[in-house]
Image: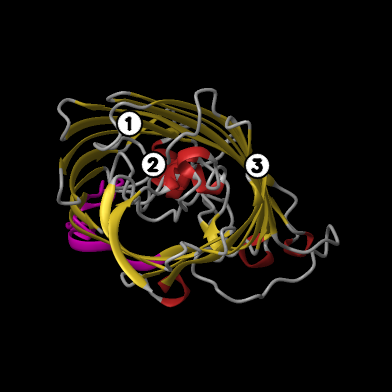
Amino acid sequence: MKKTIYRYILATALLGGTAAQASAQYDADTENGVVSMAGRKGFIWRTANGAFEFKPYLLVQAAADFNYYDSEGLDPAYNQDNVHNSGFSIPYAVLGFTGRAFGMITYNLSINAAASGGALLQQAWADIRIKDQFAVKLGKFKTPFTHATLTTLGETLFPSLPLSLTSSVILPHSLNAVSPTMATGFDLGVELHGLLRQKWGYEVGVFNGTGASVNVAGKTFSDDWHIPSLLYAARFTFMPKGVMPATQGSSRQLGLDRMLFGLSASMNVESENESTNDFRAGAEFAWIKDRLYIGAEAYFMHVGFTKRQKISDSYNYLGGYVQGGYFITPKLQAALRYDLMDRNGLDCKGMLNIPSVGVNYFFLGANLKLQAMYRFTGRTGHATQLDRDNDDLGIPMHSGTVQLQYTF
């Protein structure tokens, strides 16, 4: 093996694998969904003929968090401490490697030491490209749903994802095991994907539907539908100006002009410990133009119970956000986001509205990124004060984060 140092351009660029095997300048690289190596120097080991490549990488995030929770109308004598989940944290401590083999296989494995249980194994996959238009990816990786979660970790506009994606919805039933969220995240499965004419991308996959914390096969057949109780997901994208990078603004890519439109849908059969059937659908838009980044999404979820639960009711939820970032200087990026969530379902009045403001500073040449954000959780349109108090349970009213990230 010959050890070399060179500029390793990585097509993380390509939204969760939709175009990870794009031709032209992207063809030499592989996306890993964790940390972008684009435009950075690092170590890579490869054979003399270039048939095999091995690239180690890491990402470490250290944060200071402050969260203030509303009293929710309770007597102060029983609820005197409004500050919780505050202090210092390490959201991610990722160590992994990626590379290529035989000119047609890309691979990636990463461990998140900040996680526990099955989530320690963040990713482990191999991607076999037959040609640009058709490839097969199998293992543990990001499911094809939502621009926010498919953005490369470390390249997001804010330190945290929109609450409308990550917060569990409210169900009016006492089922502790049922707490679905809009996002589907990492999972185990197999996916067909490709890129057509450098503009049209597709991803179609089947996954366990159990999320990032489960690495074993434990699913059954659906008693109601008589099909495997798995997560079936698809995503289609249109990129009129060429392949869209999986970043929400990078100091290394200030001259780009890329745009993306996407539609996605998934069905998680007998999810939530075989209690519900969850359908999700989403629409997304992203645009990078020189120093400007704009992103917007809307998503819908229908939760219906399995027959064994003997609950005939079903519930619908909506969420979405719009966000933008602008590089004031090549190092300093300002960020705004407005997030909406119908957490208590369409049959109940009231919405959560969640504005956020942030700033990012890039230490050029050092692979350091400093992020700061403030988020406010507001409530509007509820029929009663009790509904208003219940809607944001578990969510801080005021939240602040300062995070330092190092990648290699």
Gap in angstroms between the C-alphas marked 2 and 1: 9 Å
Circle 2 packing at 10 Å, graded few (<14), some (14-19), many (20+), is many
Q: Is residue 175 visible?
A: no
Q: Is residue 93 above or below residue 24?
A: below
Question: Would you say 329 lies left or right of 323 here?
Answer: left
Q: Position of residue 54 (x, y in %)?
A: 41, 67
Circle 3 packing at 10 Å, graded few (<14), some (14-19), many (20+), is many
* Amino acid tagged 3: Ala
Q: Is residue 332 visible?
A: yes
Q: Is residue 99 above or below residue 383?
A: below
Question: Would you say 200 lies left or right of 294 here?
Answer: right
Circle 1 packing at 10 Å, graded few (<14), some (14-19), many (20+), is many
Gap in angstroms between the C-alphas marked 3 and 2: 19 Å
Gap in angstroms between the C-alphas marked 1 and 3: 24 Å
* Amino acid tagged 2: Pro
Residue located at (50% from left, 55% from top): 185
Residue 71 within the segment the image draws in magenta: yes
- Residues at discs 3 and 2 in contact (Cβ within 8 Å): no
* Residue annotated with mark 1: 337
Query: On the rendered image, what quadrant is the N terminus found in?
Result: bottom left
Choose the circle earlier in sequence order: 3 or 2.
Answer: 2
Image mark for residue 265 = 3
Residues shaded magenta:
68-97
Q: Position of residue 219 (x, y in %)?
A: 70, 71
Quarter residue 221 falls in: bottom right
* Amino acid tagged 1: Arg
Residue 94 within the segment the image draws in magenta: yes
Q: Secondary structure at mark 1?
A: strand
* Residue annotated with mark 2: 162
Residue nearest the viewer, comparing 345 with 184: 184
